[in-house]
Image (cartoon, grey):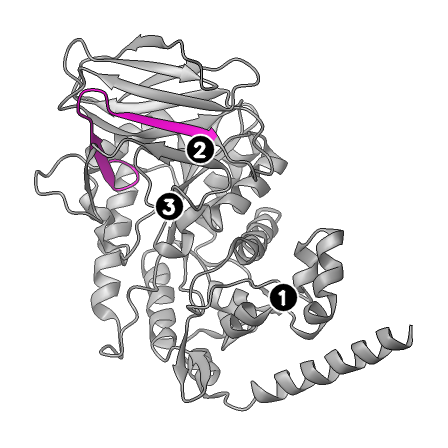
Amino acid sequence: MAQCKIRNVFFWVLGLAFLITYAGDRSTVSAANSYLSPGIVNGAEKSQLSVSNFLSPSEKDNCEVAGMLIPVGNKVPVSCNTQQLKSFFAALTAAKQKKMHIAHWGDSIILGDIISENLREDFQKQFGGNGAGWISINCDDFGMRNSIVVSFSEDWKESSIVKRNPGKLPLGISGAVYQPVQGSWVKYEIGKVSRTIRNLSLARLFYSNVPAGGTIQYYLNNSSTPQTARLDASVNLKELNITCPSGTTSIKYVFNNCQGGYFYGVSFENGEGVYLDNLPIRGNSGASLTDIPIARLKEFNSLMNYKLLIINFGVNVISPEHSNYLWYEGRMEKVISHLREAFPQASILLISVSDKAVKKGSRFMTDSGIPPLLRSQQTIAEKNNVAFWNSFQAMGGENSVVNWVESTPPLANKDYCHLKQEGGKILADLLFEALMKEMKK
Protein backbone atom coordinates (compact mmCIF):
# COMPACT_ATOMS: atom_id res chain seq x y z
CA MET A 1 0.00 0.00 0.00
CA ALA A 2 2.80 2.40 0.92
CA GLN A 3 4.55 1.68 -2.36
CA CYS A 4 1.34 2.36 -4.26
CA LYS A 5 0.93 5.77 -2.55
CA ILE A 6 4.55 6.70 -3.29
CA ARG A 7 4.06 5.70 -6.94
CA ASN A 8 0.91 7.81 -7.24
CA VAL A 9 2.65 10.86 -5.75
CA PHE A 10 5.54 10.36 -8.17
CA PHE A 11 3.23 10.28 -11.20
CA TRP A 12 1.25 13.27 -9.91
CA VAL A 13 4.44 15.35 -9.67
CA LEU A 14 5.60 14.09 -13.06
CA GLY A 15 2.28 15.02 -14.64
CA LEU A 16 2.35 18.50 -13.05
CA ALA A 17 5.81 19.07 -14.48
CA PHE A 18 4.58 17.94 -17.91
CA LEU A 19 1.70 20.39 -17.86
CA ILE A 20 3.94 23.28 -16.76
CA THR A 21 6.41 22.46 -19.55
CA TYR A 22 3.78 22.60 -22.26
CA ALA A 23 1.92 25.60 -20.92
CA GLY A 24 4.76 27.99 -21.76
CA ASP A 25 4.15 29.03 -25.37
CA ARG A 26 0.55 29.95 -26.15
CA SER A 27 1.26 31.90 -29.34
CA THR A 28 0.01 29.23 -31.71
CA VAL A 29 -3.30 28.69 -29.96
CA SER A 30 -3.84 32.44 -29.80
CA ALA A 31 -3.22 32.61 -33.53
CA ALA A 32 -5.58 29.70 -34.12
CA ASN A 33 -8.29 31.35 -32.05
CA SER A 34 -7.91 34.61 -33.96
CA TYR A 35 -8.53 32.76 -37.22
CA LEU A 36 -11.77 31.18 -36.02
CA SER A 37 -15.17 32.64 -35.35
CA PRO A 38 -16.23 33.00 -31.69
CA GLY A 39 -18.88 30.33 -32.21
CA ILE A 40 -16.27 27.75 -33.13
CA VAL A 41 -13.73 28.56 -30.42
CA ASN A 42 -16.11 29.28 -27.58
CA GLY A 43 -18.37 26.44 -28.68
CA ALA A 44 -15.72 23.93 -27.72
CA GLU A 45 -16.76 22.47 -24.41
CA LYS A 46 -14.20 20.74 -22.23
CA SER A 47 -15.47 17.19 -22.15
CA GLN A 48 -13.70 15.86 -19.04
CA LEU A 49 -12.70 12.92 -21.20
CA SER A 50 -9.54 10.97 -20.54
CA VAL A 51 -7.79 8.06 -22.17
CA SER A 52 -9.43 5.74 -19.65
CA ASN A 53 -12.91 6.68 -20.90
CA PHE A 54 -12.21 4.76 -24.11
CA LEU A 55 -10.54 1.65 -22.73
CA SER A 56 -11.68 -1.66 -21.36
CA PRO A 57 -11.46 -2.16 -17.56
CA SER A 58 -8.24 -4.18 -17.89
CA GLU A 59 -6.62 -1.44 -19.97
CA LYS A 60 -7.73 1.30 -17.57
CA ASP A 61 -5.55 -0.15 -14.83
CA ASN A 62 -2.46 0.39 -16.97
CA CYS A 63 -3.07 4.04 -17.88
CA GLU A 64 -5.30 5.44 -15.16
CA VAL A 65 -2.69 7.86 -13.82
CA ALA A 66 -1.72 9.03 -17.28
CA GLY A 67 -5.40 9.34 -18.14
CA MET A 68 -6.08 11.66 -15.19
CA LEU A 69 -3.08 13.83 -15.92
CA ILE A 70 -3.65 14.19 -19.64
CA PRO A 71 -7.32 14.81 -20.43
CA VAL A 72 -8.11 14.31 -24.12
CA GLY A 73 -10.82 15.76 -26.28
CA ASN A 74 -13.22 18.65 -26.36
CA LYS A 75 -16.91 18.40 -27.12
CA VAL A 76 -17.15 20.60 -30.21
CA PRO A 77 -20.55 21.25 -31.84
CA VAL A 78 -21.27 20.90 -35.54
CA SER A 79 -21.51 24.42 -36.96
CA CYS A 80 -22.16 26.48 -40.10
CA ASN A 81 -25.16 25.25 -42.12
CA THR A 82 -26.53 22.49 -39.91
CA GLN A 83 -30.01 22.84 -41.41
CA GLN A 84 -28.95 20.88 -44.48
CA LEU A 85 -28.23 17.91 -42.19
CA LYS A 86 -31.97 17.42 -41.66
CA SER A 87 -32.34 15.17 -44.70
CA PHE A 88 -29.52 12.99 -43.35
CA PHE A 89 -31.13 12.82 -39.92
CA ALA A 90 -34.44 11.84 -41.52
CA ALA A 91 -32.70 9.01 -43.40
CA LEU A 92 -31.07 7.86 -40.16
CA THR A 93 -34.46 7.60 -38.49
CA ALA A 94 -35.67 5.35 -41.31
CA ALA A 95 -32.40 3.40 -41.77
CA LYS A 96 -33.70 0.22 -40.13
CA GLN A 97 -36.33 0.09 -42.87
CA LYS A 98 -34.23 1.47 -45.75
CA LYS A 99 -30.50 0.95 -46.07
CA MET A 100 -28.30 4.03 -46.49
CA HIS A 101 -24.62 4.82 -46.99
CA ILE A 102 -22.27 7.53 -45.74
CA ALA A 103 -19.23 8.44 -47.85
CA HIS A 104 -16.14 9.35 -45.83
CA TRP A 105 -13.44 10.77 -48.10
CA GLY A 106 -10.18 11.85 -46.54
CA ASP A 107 -6.42 11.89 -46.78
CA SER A 108 -4.07 9.54 -44.92
CA ILE A 109 -5.63 10.60 -41.61
CA ILE A 110 -8.37 8.00 -42.33
CA LEU A 111 -6.10 5.39 -43.94
CA GLY A 112 -6.64 1.97 -42.43
CA ASP A 113 -10.26 2.75 -41.58
CA ILE A 114 -9.08 5.11 -38.81
CA ILE A 115 -12.01 7.21 -37.51
CA SER A 116 -14.33 5.60 -40.08
CA GLU A 117 -14.42 2.22 -38.35
CA ASN A 118 -15.53 3.57 -35.00
CA LEU A 119 -17.92 6.09 -36.50
CA ARG A 120 -19.47 3.24 -38.50
CA GLU A 121 -19.86 1.17 -35.34
CA ASP A 122 -21.46 4.10 -33.52
CA PHE A 123 -24.04 4.56 -36.27
CA GLN A 124 -24.75 0.84 -36.62
CA LYS A 125 -25.17 0.36 -32.90
CA GLN A 126 -27.95 2.95 -32.82
CA PHE A 127 -29.47 2.78 -36.30
CA GLY A 128 -28.87 -0.79 -37.47
CA GLY A 129 -26.69 -2.56 -39.98
CA ASN A 130 -23.61 -4.73 -39.62
CA GLY A 131 -20.73 -4.79 -42.06
CA ALA A 132 -17.67 -2.89 -43.21
CA GLY A 133 -19.30 -1.23 -46.20
CA TRP A 134 -17.03 -0.33 -49.10
CA ILE A 135 -13.64 -2.03 -49.62
CA SER A 136 -11.70 -1.34 -52.83
CA ILE A 137 -10.20 -4.07 -55.01
CA ASN A 138 -6.58 -3.13 -54.37
CA CYS A 139 -6.21 -1.28 -51.05
CA ASP A 140 -3.16 0.77 -50.10
CA ASP A 141 -4.03 0.08 -46.47
CA PHE A 142 -4.80 -3.64 -46.77
CA GLY A 143 -2.55 -4.45 -43.80
CA MET A 144 -3.91 -1.74 -41.52
CA ARG A 145 -7.61 -2.50 -41.25
CA ASN A 146 -9.23 -4.25 -38.31
CA SER A 147 -12.55 -5.05 -39.97
CA ILE A 148 -11.67 -6.70 -43.30
CA VAL A 149 -8.30 -8.08 -44.40
CA VAL A 150 -7.68 -7.77 -48.16
CA SER A 151 -5.23 -9.76 -50.30
CA PHE A 152 -4.96 -9.73 -54.07
CA SER A 153 -2.86 -10.82 -57.04
CA GLU A 154 -0.20 -8.36 -58.14
CA ASP A 155 -1.28 -8.26 -61.79
CA TRP A 156 -4.11 -5.72 -61.45
CA LYS A 157 -3.77 -2.49 -63.43
CA GLU A 158 -4.77 0.48 -61.28
CA SER A 159 -5.79 3.92 -62.48
CA SER A 160 -6.52 6.39 -59.73
CA ILE A 161 -6.21 9.86 -58.30
CA VAL A 162 -3.16 8.68 -56.35
CA LYS A 163 -1.40 6.71 -59.13
CA ARG A 164 -2.55 8.74 -62.14
CA ASN A 165 -5.08 7.96 -64.83
CA PRO A 166 -3.45 8.47 -68.25
CA GLY A 167 -6.24 6.62 -70.02
CA LYS A 168 -8.87 8.80 -68.37
CA LEU A 169 -10.83 5.77 -67.26
CA PRO A 170 -14.02 6.39 -65.24
CA LEU A 171 -12.82 6.43 -61.63
CA GLY A 172 -15.14 5.04 -58.99
CA ILE A 173 -16.40 6.23 -55.61
CA SER A 174 -12.97 5.70 -54.02
CA GLY A 175 -11.14 7.62 -56.75
CA ALA A 176 -9.79 4.47 -58.42
CA VAL A 177 -10.58 1.80 -61.01
CA TYR A 178 -8.92 -1.60 -61.45
CA GLN A 179 -8.52 -3.79 -64.53
CA PRO A 180 -7.75 -7.53 -64.31
CA VAL A 181 -5.86 -9.87 -66.54
CA GLN A 182 -6.93 -13.49 -66.97
CA GLY A 183 -7.03 -15.13 -63.55
CA SER A 184 -6.58 -12.01 -61.42
CA TRP A 185 -8.01 -12.46 -57.94
CA VAL A 186 -8.93 -10.63 -54.75
CA LYS A 187 -9.81 -12.07 -51.36
CA TYR A 188 -11.66 -10.48 -48.43
CA GLU A 189 -11.60 -11.96 -44.95
CA ILE A 190 -12.94 -10.81 -41.59
CA GLY A 191 -10.05 -9.51 -39.50
CA LYS A 192 -9.08 -11.44 -36.39
CA VAL A 193 -9.37 -8.28 -34.30
CA SER A 194 -12.68 -7.12 -35.76
CA ARG A 195 -14.90 -6.10 -32.87
CA THR A 196 -18.34 -6.30 -34.43
CA ILE A 197 -18.26 -8.20 -37.75
CA ARG A 198 -18.77 -11.93 -37.25
CA ASN A 199 -19.79 -13.14 -40.70
CA LEU A 200 -20.09 -11.93 -44.28
CA SER A 201 -23.71 -11.81 -45.34
CA LEU A 202 -24.11 -9.83 -48.56
CA ALA A 203 -21.16 -9.08 -50.86
CA ARG A 204 -21.88 -6.49 -53.58
CA LEU A 205 -19.24 -6.36 -56.34
CA PHE A 206 -19.32 -3.19 -58.49
CA TYR A 207 -18.08 -3.18 -62.09
CA SER A 208 -18.68 -2.00 -65.66
CA ASN A 209 -17.43 -2.45 -69.23
CA VAL A 210 -16.96 -6.22 -68.88
CA PRO A 211 -16.85 -7.99 -72.27
CA ALA A 212 -19.48 -10.56 -73.17
CA GLY A 213 -18.70 -13.90 -71.58
CA GLY A 214 -16.95 -12.44 -68.54
CA THR A 215 -17.36 -14.54 -65.39
CA ILE A 216 -16.05 -14.79 -61.88
CA GLN A 217 -15.44 -17.81 -59.74
CA TYR A 218 -15.87 -17.27 -56.04
CA TYR A 219 -14.75 -19.34 -53.08
CA LEU A 220 -16.36 -19.08 -49.63
CA ASN A 221 -14.47 -19.94 -46.43
CA ASN A 222 -11.35 -21.07 -48.33
CA SER A 223 -13.31 -23.80 -50.10
CA SER A 224 -11.51 -25.65 -52.89
CA THR A 225 -14.77 -25.85 -54.85
CA PRO A 226 -15.70 -22.61 -56.61
CA GLN A 227 -19.07 -21.31 -57.67
CA THR A 228 -19.43 -19.38 -60.92
CA ALA A 229 -21.35 -16.20 -61.71
CA ARG A 230 -21.76 -14.49 -65.05
CA LEU A 231 -21.22 -10.73 -65.32
CA ASP A 232 -23.34 -8.35 -67.37
CA ALA A 233 -21.74 -6.79 -70.44
CA SER A 234 -22.59 -3.11 -70.08
CA VAL A 235 -20.91 0.30 -70.06
CA ASN A 236 -23.13 1.24 -67.13
CA LEU A 237 -22.25 0.55 -63.50
CA LYS A 238 -23.44 -2.90 -62.45
CA GLU A 239 -23.35 -4.94 -59.29
CA LEU A 240 -23.09 -8.65 -58.64
CA ASN A 241 -24.70 -9.64 -55.35
CA ILE A 242 -23.58 -12.79 -53.58
CA THR A 243 -25.58 -13.83 -50.53
CA CYS A 244 -23.31 -15.83 -48.27
CA PRO A 245 -24.52 -18.58 -45.91
CA SER A 246 -24.31 -18.06 -42.17
CA GLY A 247 -20.81 -18.47 -40.82
CA THR A 248 -19.03 -17.17 -43.93
CA THR A 249 -15.84 -15.34 -42.94
CA SER A 250 -14.05 -15.04 -46.29
CA ILE A 251 -14.75 -14.71 -50.00
CA LYS A 252 -12.28 -14.93 -52.88
CA TYR A 253 -13.07 -13.74 -56.42
CA VAL A 254 -11.19 -15.03 -59.48
CA PHE A 255 -11.81 -13.10 -62.72
CA ASN A 256 -12.08 -14.91 -66.05
CA ASN A 257 -12.45 -13.32 -69.51
CA CYS A 258 -12.80 -9.91 -67.89
CA GLN A 259 -9.88 -8.13 -69.57
CA GLY A 260 -10.77 -4.52 -70.31
CA GLY A 261 -13.45 -4.46 -67.62
CA TYR A 262 -13.57 -1.84 -64.89
CA PHE A 263 -13.80 -3.12 -61.34
CA TYR A 264 -14.17 -0.88 -58.31
CA GLY A 265 -14.72 -2.77 -55.08
CA VAL A 266 -17.10 -4.68 -52.85
CA SER A 267 -19.56 -3.45 -50.24
CA PHE A 268 -20.12 -5.84 -47.32
CA GLU A 269 -23.53 -5.48 -45.72
CA ASN A 270 -25.83 -7.37 -43.40
CA GLY A 271 -29.41 -6.16 -43.29
CA GLU A 272 -30.91 -2.71 -43.34
CA GLY A 273 -29.16 0.09 -41.50
CA VAL A 274 -26.18 2.42 -41.94
CA TYR A 275 -23.01 1.65 -43.88
CA LEU A 276 -20.15 4.12 -43.66
CA ASP A 277 -17.65 3.80 -46.52
CA ASN A 278 -14.01 4.57 -45.75
CA LEU A 279 -12.56 6.24 -48.89
CA PRO A 280 -8.96 7.37 -48.26
CA ILE A 281 -7.00 9.24 -50.94
CA ARG A 282 -3.59 9.63 -49.40
CA GLY A 283 -1.32 12.54 -50.24
CA ASN A 284 -4.28 14.55 -51.56
CA SER A 285 -5.87 17.86 -50.66
CA GLY A 286 -9.39 16.75 -51.56
CA ALA A 287 -9.46 18.97 -54.63
CA SER A 288 -8.98 15.92 -56.90
CA LEU A 289 -12.43 14.57 -56.05
CA THR A 290 -13.55 16.45 -59.17
CA ASP A 291 -11.60 13.86 -61.18
CA ILE A 292 -14.33 11.31 -60.44
CA PRO A 293 -16.90 11.69 -63.25
CA ILE A 294 -20.25 13.03 -62.13
CA ALA A 295 -22.04 10.43 -64.25
CA ARG A 296 -20.27 7.57 -62.44
CA LEU A 297 -20.91 9.14 -59.02
CA LYS A 298 -24.60 9.37 -59.89
CA GLU A 299 -24.63 5.67 -60.73
CA PHE A 300 -23.01 4.82 -57.39
CA ASN A 301 -25.56 7.00 -55.63
CA SER A 302 -28.47 5.26 -57.34
CA LEU A 303 -27.18 1.88 -56.11
CA MET A 304 -25.86 2.86 -52.67
CA ASN A 305 -28.25 5.60 -51.47
CA TYR A 306 -25.72 8.05 -50.03
CA LYS A 307 -27.24 10.42 -47.47
CA LEU A 308 -24.14 12.04 -45.94
CA LEU A 309 -20.88 13.06 -47.61
CA ILE A 310 -17.96 13.67 -45.22
CA ILE A 311 -14.97 15.60 -46.60
CA ASN A 312 -11.97 15.11 -44.28
CA PHE A 313 -8.77 16.59 -45.76
CA GLY A 314 -6.18 19.20 -44.84
CA VAL A 315 -2.84 17.77 -43.72
CA ASN A 316 -1.46 17.80 -47.29
CA VAL A 317 -2.51 21.42 -47.81
CA ILE A 318 -0.36 22.88 -45.02
CA SER A 319 2.71 24.64 -46.38
CA PRO A 320 5.16 27.20 -44.97
CA GLU A 321 4.91 28.95 -48.33
CA HIS A 322 1.26 29.90 -47.81
CA SER A 323 -0.03 32.48 -45.35
CA ASN A 324 -3.51 32.20 -46.82
CA TYR A 325 -5.36 29.50 -48.71
CA LEU A 326 -7.63 31.41 -51.09
CA TRP A 327 -6.54 29.08 -53.88
CA TYR A 328 -7.71 26.13 -51.80
CA GLU A 329 -11.04 27.77 -51.04
CA GLY A 330 -11.67 28.12 -54.77
CA ARG A 331 -10.81 24.53 -55.54
CA MET A 332 -12.91 23.12 -52.70
CA GLU A 333 -15.85 25.23 -53.83
CA LYS A 334 -15.66 23.30 -57.12
CA VAL A 335 -15.49 20.00 -55.21
CA ILE A 336 -18.64 20.78 -53.23
CA SER A 337 -20.47 21.86 -56.38
CA HIS A 338 -19.34 18.65 -58.09
CA LEU A 339 -20.60 16.47 -55.24
CA ARG A 340 -23.89 18.37 -54.97
CA GLU A 341 -24.63 17.69 -58.63
CA ALA A 342 -23.88 13.99 -58.22
CA PHE A 343 -25.63 13.54 -54.84
CA PRO A 344 -28.47 16.10 -54.82
CA GLN A 345 -30.25 14.51 -51.84
CA ALA A 346 -27.18 14.12 -49.62
CA SER A 347 -26.04 16.34 -46.76
CA ILE A 348 -22.41 17.48 -46.67
CA LEU A 349 -20.10 17.75 -43.64
CA LEU A 350 -16.64 19.32 -43.89
CA ILE A 351 -14.20 18.20 -41.18
CA SER A 352 -11.21 20.45 -40.52
CA VAL A 353 -7.56 19.49 -40.36
CA SER A 354 -6.65 17.93 -37.02
CA ASP A 355 -3.60 18.91 -34.99
CA LYS A 356 -0.18 18.32 -36.52
CA ALA A 357 3.08 19.19 -34.78
CA VAL A 358 6.57 20.02 -36.05
CA LYS A 359 9.78 20.20 -34.05
CA LYS A 360 10.80 23.68 -32.92
CA GLY A 361 14.01 23.61 -30.96
CA SER A 362 13.73 20.76 -28.51
CA ARG A 363 9.92 20.56 -28.52
CA PHE A 364 7.13 19.56 -30.86
CA MET A 365 4.54 22.30 -31.38
CA THR A 366 1.48 22.83 -33.57
CA ASP A 367 2.41 23.60 -37.18
CA SER A 368 2.09 27.34 -37.80
CA GLY A 369 0.27 26.62 -41.07
CA ILE A 370 -2.75 25.19 -39.27
CA PRO A 371 -4.41 28.47 -38.08
CA PRO A 372 -4.84 30.02 -41.57
CA LEU A 373 -5.97 26.69 -42.98
CA LEU A 374 -8.59 26.34 -40.25
CA ARG A 375 -9.89 29.78 -41.15
CA SER A 376 -10.08 28.85 -44.83
CA GLN A 377 -11.86 25.56 -44.13
CA GLN A 378 -14.46 27.32 -42.02
CA THR A 379 -14.87 29.89 -44.79
CA ILE A 380 -15.36 27.09 -47.32
CA ALA A 381 -18.16 25.65 -45.18
CA GLU A 382 -19.80 29.05 -44.65
CA LYS A 383 -19.67 30.14 -48.29
CA ASN A 384 -20.91 26.81 -49.62
CA ASN A 385 -23.64 26.27 -47.02
CA VAL A 386 -22.38 22.97 -45.65
CA ALA A 387 -21.89 21.77 -42.08
CA PHE A 388 -18.50 22.07 -40.37
CA TRP A 389 -16.79 20.23 -37.52
CA ASN A 390 -13.50 21.43 -36.06
CA SER A 391 -11.41 18.34 -35.32
CA PHE A 392 -8.44 20.51 -34.28
CA GLN A 393 -10.46 21.89 -31.37
CA ALA A 394 -11.96 18.46 -30.72
CA MET A 395 -8.47 17.04 -30.22
CA GLY A 396 -7.78 19.76 -27.66
CA GLY A 397 -6.35 22.58 -29.77
CA GLU A 398 -2.75 23.72 -29.67
CA ASN A 399 -0.15 21.01 -29.07
CA SER A 400 -2.86 18.44 -28.37
CA VAL A 401 -1.26 15.90 -30.70
CA VAL A 402 1.83 16.00 -28.45
CA ASN A 403 -0.32 14.83 -25.55
CA TRP A 404 -1.88 12.18 -27.77
CA VAL A 405 1.53 10.83 -28.84
CA GLU A 406 2.84 10.75 -25.27
CA SER A 407 -0.33 9.32 -23.75
CA THR A 408 -0.44 5.78 -22.37
CA PRO A 409 -1.52 4.00 -24.48
CA PRO A 410 -0.44 6.28 -27.38
CA LEU A 411 -3.33 7.84 -29.29
CA ALA A 412 -1.24 9.18 -32.18
CA ASN A 413 1.88 8.08 -34.03
CA LYS A 414 5.31 9.55 -33.51
CA ASP A 415 5.07 11.47 -36.78
CA TYR A 416 2.90 13.83 -34.66
CA CYS A 417 0.22 13.77 -37.32
CA HIS A 418 -1.54 10.44 -37.84
CA LEU A 419 -3.78 8.82 -35.27
CA LYS A 420 -3.69 5.32 -33.90
CA GLN A 421 -6.89 3.27 -33.69
CA GLU A 422 -7.42 4.41 -30.09
CA GLY A 423 -7.16 8.06 -31.11
CA GLY A 424 -9.45 7.49 -34.08
CA LYS A 425 -12.05 6.07 -31.70
CA ILE A 426 -11.94 9.19 -29.54
CA LEU A 427 -12.45 11.54 -32.51
CA ALA A 428 -15.17 9.29 -33.97
CA ASP A 429 -17.08 9.18 -30.69
CA LEU A 430 -16.83 12.97 -30.28
CA LEU A 431 -18.09 13.53 -33.83
CA PHE A 432 -20.95 11.06 -33.38
CA GLU A 433 -21.95 12.75 -30.14
CA ALA A 434 -21.91 16.16 -31.85
CA LEU A 435 -24.11 14.88 -34.69
CA MET A 436 -26.57 13.24 -32.30
CA LYS A 437 -26.80 16.44 -30.27
CA GLU A 438 -27.57 18.35 -33.46
CA MET A 439 -30.13 15.74 -34.48
CA LYS A 440 -32.06 16.23 -31.22
CA LYS A 441 -32.50 19.97 -31.73
The mark found on residue 408 in the picture is: 1
Q: Earlier in the sequence, mark 3 or mark 2?
A: 2
Q: Residues within 10 Å of mark 3 (few under 14, many from 20)?
A: some
**Given the current orientation, which residue lies at the most extreme right position?**
1
Say which label, 3 or 1, has the lower sequence index.
Answer: 3
Residue holding disc 2: 133
Viewer-nearest of discs 2 and 1:
1
Instruction: Identify which amino acid the numbered label 2 is placed on.
Output: Gly
Which element carries disc 3, helix, strand or loop?
Answer: loop
In the rendered image, residue 99, in percent from the top left (x then y), is placed at: 48, 26
The answer to whether residue 211 is magenta is no
Q: Which residue is mark 3?
A: 141
Q: Is residue 441 above or below residue 409?
A: above
- Residue 199 image offset from top left, x and y in percent: 55, 24
Amino acid residing under circle 3: Asp
The residue range painted magenta reads 172-189
Label 2 crowd (10 A; few <14 / some 14-19 / many >=20): many
